Image (cartoon, helix red, strand yellow):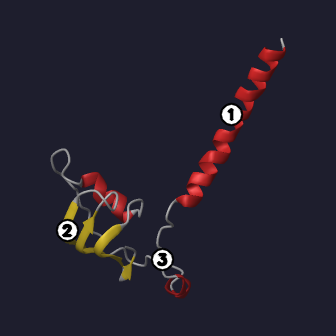
Amino acid sequence: MTLTFALKGFMNLQSNMVNADRCMKLLELPQESLLQNDVMKSRPKWPESGFMEFQNVSLKYRPWTETVLHELSFKVNVGEKIGIVGRTGAGKSTICLAISRIVEIFEGKILIDGLDIG
């Protein structure tokens, strides 16, 4: 009975330490680059019009992997609706990840109303 009690206690401790381990791993992750706080304070209604431009954007999912977007450039004018089409693996979802800054670009600029968010 003592062995069963000790094993249950050990397993409970181990399962509780998983949360602490995950928190410690999050502290080791590199922090994303911050948007320019002074520009954001001076433009509280940003984005004003919604003009977006990609200027030679290149992106890797991790620093040691291959480039998945190669010098991508395009403009989306104010009020314009666009559709992104292509075969599997062409980079459609990656463009959305770059705009939302889930994956950071390593080269080029993403401008929204003139503010570089990349």
Nearer the observer, 32 or 82: 32
Q: Residues within 10 Å of mark 2 (few under 14, many from 20)?
A: some
Q: Quadrant of residue 64?
A: bottom left
Q: Residues within 10 Å of mark 1 (few under 14, many from 20)?
A: few
The circle drawn on residue 49 is: none
Q: Is residue 46 left or right of residue 80?
A: right
Q: Is residue 116 left or right of residue 107?
A: right
Q: Secondary structure at mark 1?
A: helix
Disc on the earlier residue, 2 or 1: 1
Q: Residue at the spot x=84%, y=16% of the render?
A: 2
Q: Quadrant of the C terminus?
A: bottom left
Q: Quadrant of residue 114?
A: bottom left
Question: What is the residue that sits farthest to the front in this orientation?
Answer: 3
Residues at marks 2 and 1, CA–CA distance in whole angstroms: 47 Å
Q: Is residue 22 left or right of residue 74?
A: right
Question: What is the residue that sits farthest to the right in this orientation?
Answer: 2
Tag 2 residue: 72
Q: Secondary structure at mark 3?
A: loop
- Residue type at mark 3 is Leu
Q: Residue at the spot x=47%, y=78% of the render?
A: 46
The circle drawn on residue 35 is: 3
- Residue type at mark 1 is Gln
Nearer the observer, 37 or 6: 6
Tag 1 residue: 14
Q: Residue at the spot x=69%, y=40% of the render?
A: 17
Q: Position of residue 80 (x, y in %)?
A: 26, 68
